Image (cartoon, grey):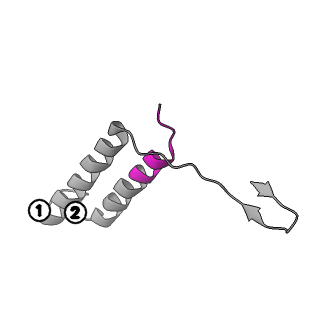
Amino acid sequence: MIFTKTAQWRVTVKLHAPTKGWFTASLIIVLVAVIGALSPVPYVTSYGIWVAILAYVVLAVGNLAPSS
């Protein structure tokens, strides 16, 4: 964070493209959510929206994680 004389905070976040691992993990989780929505799968069918949100969070973490 940078504090300037005009009393404004500036937050800089460096985003990166997710690596293949993060993207693949997110893709697998969202596929599980879609399969759970189309057919009865224990636990996944009941919490399908949370599984889909988890896939989105994994992808967001992949964007924030530094790639080498």
* Residue 10: % across, % down: 72, 60
Q: Nearer the viewer, residue 25 or 16?
A: 16
Confirm whether the magenta stretch covers residue 37: no
Magenta segment, which residues? Answer: 59-68
48 relative to 38 in the view: left or right = right
| Numbered disc total | 2
Determine crowd level at label 1: few under 14, some 14-19, many 20+ residues with C-alpha closer than 10 A.
few
In terms of image quadrants, where is residue 36?
bottom left
Magenta run includes residue 63: yes
Give residue 45's mark: 2
Q: Is residue 5 above or below residue 20?
A: below
- Left or right: 29 in relation to 8: left
Q: Residue furthest right?
A: 5
Using the image, determine if residue 63 lies above or below residue 41: above
Q: What secondary structure is the stretch in magenta mostly built from?
A: helix
Q: Residue at x 31, y 60 (%)?
A: 52
Query: Percent position (x, y) of residue 40?
Result: 13, 61
| Amino acid type at mark 1 | Ser
Q: Count residues near mark 2 (Cα–Cα under 10 Å), then give few for <14, some for 14-19, many for 20+.
A: some
- In the picture provided, is 6 more to the left or to the right than 66? right
Q: Which mark is residue 39?
A: 1
* x, y percent for residue 43: 25, 57
Residues under numbered marks 2 and 1 in contact, where contact means CB atoms less than 8 Å apart: yes
Front-most of residues 6 and 64: 6
Which residue, as the protein is rendered here, is positioned at the far front?
A: 5
Q: Amino acid at mark 2?
A: Thr
Name the residue: 26% across, 55% down: 30
**For residue 12, what is the image quadrant?**
bottom right
Q: Helix or strand or loop: what does disc 1 sit on?
A: loop
Query: Which numbered disc, 2 or 1, marks the residue that appears first in the sequence?
Result: 1
Q: Position of residue 60 (x, y in %)?
A: 44, 53
Foreground residue, 64 or 41? 64
